[in-house]
Each structure stands twice: as C-alpha cells, then as structure tokens.
Amino acid sequence: MLREIDRNREGERKLHEVIKRIEPFDEGAAELARRHSDNLTKPPGSLGKLEEIAAQLAGMTGELWPELSRRAVIVMAGDHGVCEEGVSAFPPSVTPQMVLNFLNGGAAVNVLARQAGADVICVDIGVAAELEHPGLEPRKIVFGTRNMAKEPAMTREEAVAAINVGIAIAEEQYTRGVRMFATGEMGIGNTTASAALASVLAGLAPEASVGRGTGINEETRQHKVMVVKRAIDVNRPNPKDPIDVLAKVGGAEIAGLVGVILGAAALRCPVVIDGFISSAAALVASKLSPMAAAYMIASHLSNEQGHRKLMDVLGLPPVLHLDMRLGEGTGAVLAFHLIDASLRLMREMATFDSAGVSRG
C-alpha cells in the first residue's frame, strides 16, 4: 500500500514539475509581431486571423518568426468500457483496426499530414488489444478503461501515468526537432467520455454536451445523455480536481493528450487542438495550468454538439468551419497550412518603407 502511495506521489510530482515550467505568454514578442504586421504593404488588420496567428506564435515561442517546419500530429489511441452501454454506432473492435490503418498510412489524417509535411505519431496508450507494428509507440497504461457508468474509468494513478506518457512523447519529439504539435485521437466511445468531462469541468448540461459522435440517431443520443448522467452520479467527480474528473469519467487517450498539451507548452511549442475530444483534453490541461491555454490554437469548429460551447469556455476561437467530425487530428493538420501562410506573409511581404509605398 505504501509503495502504491509512493508511486502516486512520484507521478504527480513529475506532472507538477512540468506544469511549473510553463512560462507566461510573451506579450512583448507578440506586440513586436503586430507592429511588424502593421508595417506591411496592406491596411492594418486586413489579413484578419492570419495576423493574429502570427502574433500568437511569436508570443508562444518568444521568437518573431519561429521555425516550425518540423511538426507532428500525436494520435493517442484507447478504448472505453462505457461502450458496453451501447453509446456508439461502431463496435470497440474498430479502435485497433483503425490504429493499424494509421500505422499503414491509410487514414484521413495520414493523407492530410503528408500534404502538410507532418509526421503522424500513433501511440497505444489504452487499446483493449495487443498491437505490434514497427511504427507504433507502445505506451499502454490500461487495457481499455472500465465502464464509467458503473465505476471510475481509471484510477488516479492510471490517469496521471497517462498524462505523463503524453508529456514524454512531446519531449521525445522535441529532441527530434519537432517544434509544432497537433492533437489527434482514436477510441470508440470517446465522445461519451469527452461529453462527461465537458459537463463536469465546463458546467454544461449533458443534453448540451452529448452529440451524435460516430453518427448515432436521436434515440441513441438520448440514451447516451442518460449514460453520461449516470456516470457523473455514480462517480461524483470533483470539478475542482481535474485529475479526479479525468480519472473517473475520462479516457486514457484523452489523458495522453492532456500530457501532450502540457508538455508542448512547457517547451514553448504551439499545439494545435483538433475537435471535440481534443478540446476536452485541452479543457483538462487548462484547468491544471491556466497558462497552458496561451499555447493552444483551435483548428476548427466540429459538428459535434457542445464543441462551440467548449471553445467558448476555453476562449479559443476556431480558425476553420468545415462541418467536420472525424477526429484523428484531421482538422488540426489542416490548420497547419494556415499557420504556414501566416508566417510566410510576415516573413516575405514587403514593408511600406522597403517597397516605397505610401501609407495613406
């Protein structure tokens, strides 16, 4: 028992050490970027969000025009015991099948990542199957979570361990030269866990946080609402303790993404948030470290009910509105192109002085 307590303390100590390393957003660098933008040959503010993205990147990294050509989308994969309740249109067996699809380069995120020049790092953090592949990052913390409608999805130790896996992945990729991250996930049932997290941590009613996920009908959605309510009633997660909430009604892959976000922020690297599930992870990360939110860029507004409300709570305006609800990191990878455009405009456009153009 004492050894288990020591392991718990050690895991949380490591986590809080990383949180302490997250520095405030560099307002001075962001203001320099805005001034440069205002001196380019265009009316001030006329490039809209592209100008603000450039300022955000400067504030995140402390560099006026950071070099972000090495980028990776971290796809965390895990299964959910709550699937026993019939909350998804797909069976849990799809999770390991899709993981192999990612590893073989055949998923949507692979296609979009190739176009964006990004690596796809696929992590088995909680798949309920034994997986082997030379490209897989095998970091299994749980063999699928438990059914949160009946008991906590994970122990606190498991949730912390999964967060620390995400931090380790971010740090390892950083040593390989990655300077911009995107969050991706795979796990049948994870919109149910994300809805529960949103309900507890963002104060959303389950009726507002629960959407159609993989394409369920309205009858099944209403059943899913009741499952989320039951999970919250059974486990009574403490909204003032994000780790308690994550352990009781979250998922291993969501916890892993919390770690990726915190790890990237501690390294002063931008992290591009994907859809609803990634945003639930972003919410947990922001509760653990409010400063971490300054290192996030919201890629897109998904079609999943509750995503807009979650973005409002996080204070992150999505860049794209494409009616997507796939996950995997697809929306985040698409946003890489706009980030590249933002930086190229700031680096390559002429200033009024260099071009000899009157300011008006």
Image: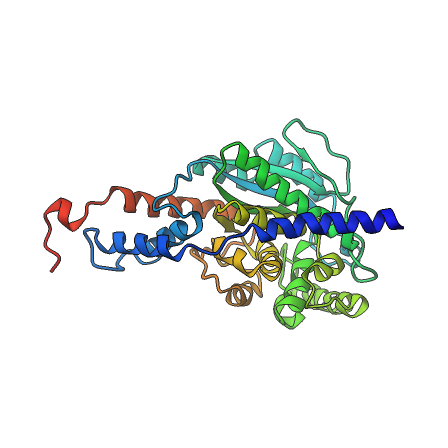
- Outermost residue, top direction? 134
State whether residue 178 is above or below residue 85. Answer: above
- Foreground residue among 207 and 51: 51
**Closest to the observer: 11 or 332?**
11
User: Which residue sits at x=68%, y=29%?
Assistant: 133
Q: Position of residue 154 (x, y in %)?
A: 78, 54
| x 79%, y 65%: residue | 235
Q: Which residue appears at 49% of the width and 65% of the height?
A: 315
Q: Does residue 257 appear in the picture of this structure? A: no
| Lateral position of residue 15 relative to residue 108, left or right | right
Query: Could you tell whether 128 is left or right of 318 in the image?
Result: right
How far across and how far down the image is residue 339, in percent? 39, 47
Compared to residue 199, the image places residue 275 above or below, namely: above
Q: Position of residue 60 (x, y in %)?
A: 44, 51
Observer-nearest of 99 and 262: 262
Q: On the image, which quarter does residue 204 sit in?
A: bottom right
Residue 106 in percent (x, y) is at 57, 35
Is residue 64 shown left or right of residue 226? left
> Can residue 28 be spotted in the picture?
yes
Q: Residue furthest right?
A: 1
Quarter holding the C terminus is: bottom left
